[in-house]
């Protein structure tokens, strides 16, 4: 069992710290909210007067804070973690912050001789309570190995996302995809309703196609991800079908900004000579627009 | 077994007609391409000199054509289907065309005393060959029942989508969702690559979340579809996370037009006072923007 | 003075026809609305029972109709213009329709041996009454010369836009630009209001810059249109400033979908290596995305 | 003549400081770049070892820095302006930074008893050299009056934008509008080229319409800005024309993401029941989407 500094006892942090205590770890906690601290003390934690005091003697420092500026303040500010931290300790930022800020934090810690990794979590506060969070670990294999027993006290699934900074990156991608997809799904559902079509019927159909199952595991693996752009379904036809959908939506005045944006992406793919490629070639189109070199 | 007029022997139509023949139906085929006709004749079909001739004596007329103008021409043009059609026959348009055009075709057929339904198909020409198409049937229960034996010669799954016009509608929704989702997926994958993150890691994570599984069967059923907008994940936070993703993408110059469009949808949801509602409330936001009345 | 067939006596067509009469032309008019016809007859026109009858003996045929399908019907339908038209007459379509439809109409008329040009109009029905319309003439120099005396009875400014089809094209470009610009202007004004800034102050400033004066006559002529992409204001900085504006707008929840879309265009320009080029290079970026060859 | 601290001697700051010297002001300058300092010293300025030293004894402090974090550091950091500043001095930030950051800076200065205003500049480094910048002054009437003699040494036009923070706001709005308009103009020009239309012809037409002259001073003043939404040109028709333009663009594969986004705004206006209002009502639509209360 380890001595762990835990900084940030909010809606997620408090139950995560509680689970560490229940597994027998020794916690030194810090939060600006005295009630949050008191609650953990009652569960067996020691209250620290500052981040530096919390860090003193700890083998692990865990930060779970609302944004990157706060993480920076807690680490490098007056009476911050660095003032009390041993160079043999491992700092784990579990906050969801800006990835490029994560990079700078890790870099700045490294410059001071400290080891740091990022392990943001997935799922909800219910899972935090139950100790069943998804742990997205960015760190060296050594860091991940060392942190795993501590982390698994808070979650039940750990993904080693790659080196330091990769945990927050995979969280970002996942959130991006799910949040934007939510808006796209709403456009489809609104159009469905405006067309007088049963949503249950639409779901029954979409559950069996990439519309519902996504492309990552259906259309992409055997086509674009293998470099095969021979058409199972052509960009030109996908573009045409999008045009019909947008025309219908506009006649029924269902605004579909994501759909409209996507048609222009397909249009650009056609301009780039991809009209007769498989629709999964849209990945290559977007990669090219981003200046990513051919794979 | 029935006498069936089959008009349109292209990449999809030809194998579909072939399967009807193999099941013992009697086919009267028409196409402008003599080779396509010849091939079906060799399989046992009778060649017709015109759509009207094909329709004469048929219990079913199936059209499988590239666009709605052609379907109209074939039905109502000179020597068109209507000139040879019995009022007891059932016309089935299996083409993928504009839904509002489908409505007009069905309406115009009805005015002339003819029965018509729409049954566009899902999947690919490989499935057309194998007789394993997905059949999206728009028609009255009587029409669907009557057509089923014929349709199931061409496919292995039939979805009764609702009344006439609903087959083409569900196809439209499905295509809209899958085609736009393809572009959104490409943005996520390009950002992943620009961030130096392993796509396999991203997939592993997304496969367990709405990012990969979609929202229709994960987050929506217990929240917005039930009318519960209490937040499991707030619109405000989703908006913030999108903002971070777009900021990162713009720093790495990965253009994300769909992501950018989606952020403005969340922004509008916040302006409408939905910031503290569950992120699935984005459906209600899009419905409101479309002027759809509260459910 | 000429014998002119005038077909389409709506809100625009009626006053245009009236002005032709006042200038001494002899009009043979057709419209489905008997009241519209009667009003012109009272002004001195002759009523025709069909487009073909209107066209008989006319030196000019003018069509002013709501959409291209109607123009096609009027020209080529049963008792259409073509049935009564002399091959020495000049047909002038003044409707606002789809340019590619205009092309087909002109092509089909030409195939039948008839001369046709397109002259859509600018400005409003007030200007139609006053005879001060803007005339956007697409035709050969001979067609334009021949039509000018007739056209100038209806307008006070004629722009020779190039060969047949170019009149409708320039109208399309002008409408596109002004309609989309209207929406963009609304975003700027809403952000202005949300920022608590006086709109009068904003106008005073914008009236002196490309924001109010446009780029066509200010920044473009000496830079991108001359092939000079050395930076007066860099793409990178323009992208940064857009990012600030969008960040502010999103904090104030002012949805700015056009602004969001434009940032991604600048982002793509940066990905294409244009970050240090002049901001007018965005034209070259958009041209490249459209597959237009370097000028 | 005044004693002025000038901090930030970059491409804009250096010539601005030079003009202050030429008008007889006494300058105490600071910059991290010793060559930039040396050049000003040769023109008569005094070099300061820190922002605080530069501020000592100065009646005005001018900051001209690349971003807001630097302004904050220069004002409040170690040896920052505040350490040497008299409470009777006026601090003028002329940098282009985030407006909400400007607000916080002014607030924080005020809390320390200091007076601060924002005066970002318009135009280019050529104008900075010539002393002909556009000065966008955000400040109380007293601040503006006091600063005017100093400011007019650097520019030839001063706009009093309103209270503190309004200078940077009007700059933001102006930049937003001109930068996004640049991208929109590029779409129109690319479509023009793809249509084979002479750009000179398009310009000739657009120069006489809102497409080239903007809406702020043409269509808006007598309609939406007066609360008159009776249609000179209906939203429904504007939406239709945009649809034609986008259809043409997509057929010619000219991607038009801004145009596509704008059509969805008009679509939403129609969903909100504005289809028969004047097209300038799009302002009211965007205001409503932003949650701005009816005027």
Image (cartoon, coloured by chain):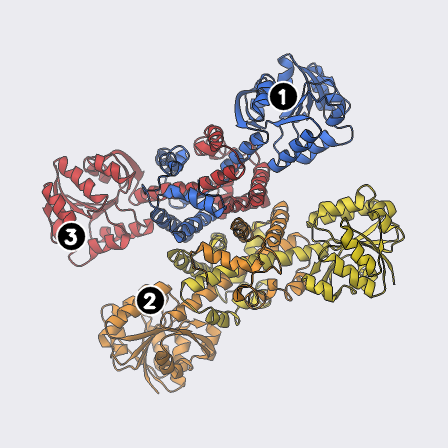
Chain colours: A blue, B red, C orange, D yellow
Using the rendered view, name the quadrant where residue B159 is placed: top left
What residue is shown with label 3?
B51
List x then y, in percent, for residue B47: 10, 48
Q: Is residue B230 visible?
A: no
Residue C272 relative to residue C234: left or right: left
Q: Looking at the image, is mark 3 or mark 2 nearer the viewer?
A: 2
Element carrying mark 1: helix
Which element is circle 2 on? helix
Residue C103 badge: 2
Image spot of residue B146 (x, y percent): 20, 38
Measure the C-alpha gap from mark 3 to mark 2: 30 Å
Separation of marks 2 and 1 at Cα, in angstroms: 70 Å
Residue D273: percent from the left, percent from the top? 49, 54
Discs 3 and 1 carry the same chain letter:
no
Nearest the viewer among C124 and C111 is C111
Mark 3 vs 2: CB contact within 8 A: no
Q: What subunit carries mark 1?
A: A
């Amino acid at each position: 069992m380890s001595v762990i500094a835990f900084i940030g006892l909010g809606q997620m942090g408090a139950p995560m710290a509680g689970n560490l205590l229940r597994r027998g770890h020794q916690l030194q906690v810090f939060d600006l909210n005295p009630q949050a601290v008191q609650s953990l003390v009652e569960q067996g934690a020691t209250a620290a007067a500052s981040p530096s005091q919390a860090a003193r003697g700890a083998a692990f420092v865990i930060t779970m804070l609302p944004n990157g500026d706060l993480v920076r303040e807690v680490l490098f500010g007056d009476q911050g973690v660095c003032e009390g931290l041993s160079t043999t300790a491992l700092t784990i930022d579990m906050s969801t912050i800006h990835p490029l800020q994560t990079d700078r934090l890790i870099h700045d810690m490294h410059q001071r001789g400290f080891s740091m990794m990022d392990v943001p979590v997935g799922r909800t506060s219910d899972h935090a309570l139950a100790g069943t969070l998804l742990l997205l670990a960015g760190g060296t294999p050594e860091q991940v190995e060392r942190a795993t027993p501590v982390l698994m006290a808070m979650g039940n699934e750990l993904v080693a996302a790659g080196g330091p900074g990769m945990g927050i990156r995979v969280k970002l991608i996942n959130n991006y995809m799910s949040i934007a997809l939510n808006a796209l799904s709403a456009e489809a559902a609104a159009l469905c309703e405006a067309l007088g079509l049963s949503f249950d019927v639409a779901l029954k159909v979409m559950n069996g196609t990439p519309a519902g199952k996504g492309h990552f595991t259906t259309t992409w693996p055997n086509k674009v991800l293998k470099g095969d752009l021979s058409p199972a379904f052509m960009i030109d036809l996908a573009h045409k079908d999008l045009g019909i959908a947008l025309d219908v939506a506009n006649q029924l005045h269902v605004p579909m900004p994501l759909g409209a944006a996507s048609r222009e992406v397909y249009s650009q793919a056609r301009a780039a000579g991809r009209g007769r490629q498989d629709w999964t070639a849209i990945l290559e189109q977007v990669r090219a627009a981003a200046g990513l070199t051919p794979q």
